[in-house]
Image: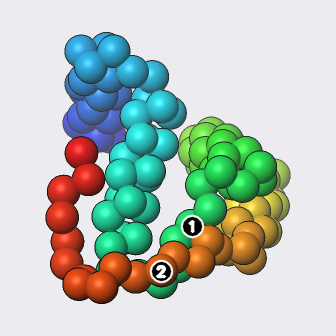
Amino acid sequence: MVISVATACSGVRLQSTFHAAIGMHPDDYDFKVLRLTTEISRQVFPITLDLDHPRFKPGLDRLVEIERKIAEAKKQKGIVARLKQATLAVAAAATFARLYVLPAKCNALPAQIRLAPVW
């Protein structure tokens, strides 16, 4: 248990150092990576995620918050903690389902399908 906690703390420390070094908040960095991967996927797929949909980012933020609450509930013991975990798991599934049914953006494929750098 001590090793996993130390490893987790070390990972958080390294992640914080990384984001500080590049001058970006972790959420901004994550969304930038999501935008880059979406641009790459546009080169070979006829649809992409609508990252600008007003419910997309709040849905992702909600999933992150639910995950944090699940992690806190897992540290607790007893039936109440298990009920919290189950309720939060249902909330996560419902949030994911709402994200899943958001309309995708149609994308005309290029004449020559190939992967090219987007940055």
Q: Secondary structure at mark 1?
A: loop
Q: Quadrant of residue 83?
A: bottom right
Q: Residue at x 27, y 19 (%)?
A: 22
Q: Is residue 109 above or below residue 87?
A: below
| Neighbour tally class for label 2: few under 14, some 14-19, many 20 plus, Cα within 10 Å | few
Foreground residue among 42 and 9: 42
Q: Is residue 80 above or below residue 5?
A: below
Locate residue 106 relative to residue 18 in the image: left or right: right
Residue 21 picture location, percent across and down? 24, 15
The type of residue carrying mark 1 is Leu
Total label count? 2
Precedes in sequence: disc 2 or disc 1:
1
Q: Quadrant of residue 97?
A: bottom right
Label 1, on which residue? Answer: 49
Q: Residue at x 72, y 73 (%)?
A: 103
Q: Residue furthest front?
A: 111
Q: Secondary structure at mark 2?
A: loop
> Does the image show residue 6?
no
Q: CA distance from mark 2 to mark 1?
A: 14 Å
Label 2, on which residue? Answer: 108
